[in-house]
């Protein structure tokens, strides 16, 4: 089964920046949307940002103005530029791709740690 591969996580100081990338291990067709979820210890997974095949984007209120999602759903690639990082952004970040038929592909997750 084709999986998504995330890169770009790491440790950064508060106020710093990171860029996450996500690409498939093979070919995935008919992607309606891609994006990023995150899950912090003891918390539920939350949607951070999403990009549709029409080019529309949406963001969690907590990251608006700091994070930018970009990519190409026809190539199943998506990026997340994260600026002005805060300790509360610390989490495992998961890339996903949703097909027009409702199926999902997920990445294995990449750790982002923001130190104060």
Image (cartoon, rainbow, N blue to C red):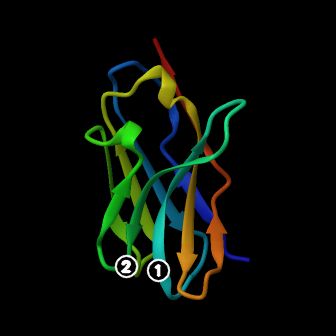
Residue 87 drawn at (x, y percent): 48, 21
User: To which quarter of the image does residue 62 belong?
Assistant: top left
Work out whether residue 20 or residue 31 is closer to the camera in this orientation and state it: 31
Task: Name the residue carrying label 2.
Answer: 53
Picture layout, residue 108 above or below residue 111 = below
Confirm or deny contact between disc 2 and disc 1 (CB under 8 A): yes
Q: Which mark is residue 112?
A: none
The residue shown at (44%, 68%) is: 77
Q: Nearer the viewer, residue 34 or 23?
A: 34
- Residue ID at (34%, 32%): 17
Camera-nearest residue between 22 and 55: 55
* Quadrant occupied by the C terminus: top left
Sequence order check, earlier mark of 2 and 1: 1
Q: Which mark is residue 32?
A: 1
Distance from the alpha carbon under mark 2 to that under mark 1: 5 Å
- Judged from this view, the residue extending furthest toward the front is 61
Q: Is residue 91 left or right of residue 20?
A: right
């Amino acid at each position: 089964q084709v999986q998504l591969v995330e890169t770009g996580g790491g440790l950064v100081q508060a106020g710093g920046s990171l860029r996450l990338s996500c690409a498939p291990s093979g070919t995935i067709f008919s992607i309606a949307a891609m994006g990023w979820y995150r899950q912090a210890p003891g918390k539920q997974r939350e949607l951070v940002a999403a990009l549709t095949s029409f080019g529309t984007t949406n963001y969690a209120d907590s990251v608006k103005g700091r994070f930018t999602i970009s990519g190409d759903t026809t190539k199943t690639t998506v990026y997340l530029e994260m600026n002005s990082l805060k300790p509360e952004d610390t989490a495992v970040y998961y890339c996903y791709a949703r097909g027009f038929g409702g199926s999902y592909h997920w990445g294995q997750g990449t750790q982002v740690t923001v130190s104060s």
